[in-house]
């Protein structure tokens, strides 16, 4: 529903007797994707990645996610095709609460905690937002998708900024019960009343 509302709010201006469209047009790839559940999910995921990550990281996350989903080699899009899809989806969520929610959740203290073992060697502690490996982000996304398919009941993701982005995806896109908890046990955020019913922590 959130994706449908986002697509409905996308701007489009017709000129020259509607022979030229500026913005997201009637037959735009974004509107076409939103017509199916799978397309809408792909659209939201690409737009969310584009909002918060560099193109290189976002492409690698999509490639890793496709590998985890066991996409066969002949059907695997190239990095350039993924980048084109990311660019087509850019800005689709700008009229929604997702970008703000993701940014707030990504402000979780301790920017040195990353999913997996990846370390950004160029980052100076305390000055740049750390980023987990694309494989770790994809594995966490895949686990969250298993909850929606009833293959898992709940997961716990340990990390910092990337965990905040994953929490925003789980809540805004998938309507899951989410809690963000600091290492000392204090609750940073929850969207429900019973912590024992967390689907994503």
Image: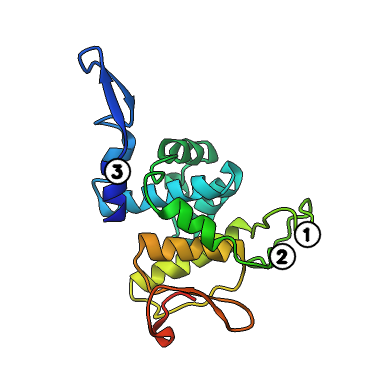
The disc label shown at residue 125, or none: 1
Looking at the rendered image, the quarter that the N terminus falls into is bottom left
Disc 1 packing (10 Å; few <14; some 14–19; many ≥20): few
Residue furthest to the left: 17
Q: Secondary structure at mark 2?
A: loop
Measure how far apart labels 3 and 1 are at the Cα level.
38 Å
Q: Secondary structure at mark 1?
A: loop
Of 44 and 195, the residue lying toward us: 195
Q: Position of residue 11 (x, y in %)?
A: 31, 33
Asked if marks 3 and 2 touch (Cβ < 8 Å), the reply is: no
Based on the displayed image, in which of its 4 quarters is residue 129 positioned? bottom right
Of 64 and 169, the residue lying toward us: 169
Q: Earlier in the sequence, mark 3 or mark 1?
A: 3
Measure how far apart labels 3 and 2 are at the Cα level.
36 Å
Q: Residue at x 20, y 14 (%)?
A: 17
| Residue located beneath label 2 in the image | 112
Asked if marks 1 and 2 touch (Cβ < 8 Å), the reply is: yes
The disc label shown at residue 7, or none: 3
Q: Is the residue 153 above or below the residue 85 in the image?
A: below
Q: Is residue 173 left or right of residue 140?
A: left
């Amino acid at each position: 529903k959130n994706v449908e509302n986002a697509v409905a709010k996308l701007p489009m201006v017709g000129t020259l007797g509607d022979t030229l469209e500026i913005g997201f047009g009637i037959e735009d790839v974004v509107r076409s994707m939103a017509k199916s559940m799978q397309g809408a999910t792909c659209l939201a995921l690409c737009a969310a990645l584009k909002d918060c990550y560099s193109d290189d990281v976002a492409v690698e996350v999509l490639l890793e996610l496709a590998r985890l989903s066991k996409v066969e080699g002949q059907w695997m899009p190239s990095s350039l095709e993924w980048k084109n899809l990311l660019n087509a989806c850019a800005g689709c969520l700008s009229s929604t609460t997702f970008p703000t929610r993701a940014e707030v959740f990504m402000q979780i203290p301790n920017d040195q905690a990353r999913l997996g073992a990846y370390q950004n060697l160029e980052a100076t502690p305390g000055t740049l937002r750390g980023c987990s490996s694309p494989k770790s982000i994809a594995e966490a996304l895949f686990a969250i998708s298993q909850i929606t398919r009833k293959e898992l009941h709940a997961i716990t993701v340990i990390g910092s900024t990337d965990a905040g982005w994953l929490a925003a995806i789980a809540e805004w896109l998938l309507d899951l019960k989410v809690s963000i908890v600091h290492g000392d046990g204090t609750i940073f955020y929850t969207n429900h009343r019973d912590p024992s019913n967390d689907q994503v922590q």
